[in-house]
Amino acid sequence: MLQTFAILLVFQTVGEVISYALRLPVPGPVIGMLLLFGWLVFDNRLLPVIQGSASELLKHLSLLFVPAGVGIMVHANRIGSEWMPIVIALVLSTWIAIAVTALVTRALMRKPPREAPADAGAQP
């Protein structure tokens, strides 16, 4: 578990450094998770190391929503006065996310599966 936390913190820190150095409007943890995803796609040796602990962390994911709930309660007056732009942003971003997901899924489903090399089953 400690090794998984260390790996996640390294990727988050690298993401923070990139975000700060390049003055990107994207949070460092998001960049870090994208870097981790890319790393796992191209070299999945880290997968067995983090898979078990990450599954345990996901069981407690609901705890991460507590700060968001507190933020909503603290800023209830502001949300009440600006509810229309918030609703519009939520609806539009949801529609965009659904559309992008559908387009990516369609593109991936059209892609033919990779064929195994002809000599994969040959014995030397």
Image (cartoon, grey):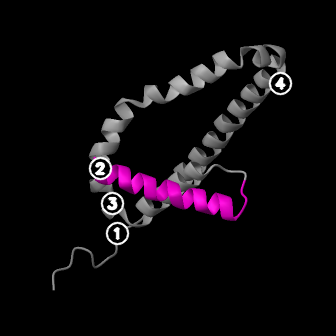
Q: CA distance from mark 4 to mark 2?
A: 42 Å
- Asked whether residue 69 is drawn in magenta, I would say no
Question: Residue drawn at (62%, 40%), measured in percent from left and top?
Answer: 102
Q: Residues within 10 Å of mark 2 (few under 14, many from 20)?
A: few
Circle 1 is placed at which residue position? 116
Circle 2 is placed at which residue position? 2
Q: Secondary structure at mark 3?
A: helix
Q: Earlier in the sequence, mark 4 or mark 2?
A: 2
Looking at the picture, does residue 85 appear above or below residue 102?
above
Q: Residues within 10 Å of mark 3 (few under 14, many from 20)?
A: few
Circle 3 is placed at which residue position? 46
Q: Secondary structure at mark 2?
A: helix
Circle 4 is placed at which residue position? 85
- Read off the magenta span: 1-24
Q: Amino acid at mark 2?
A: Leu
Q: Earlier in the sequence, mark 1 or mark 4?
A: 4
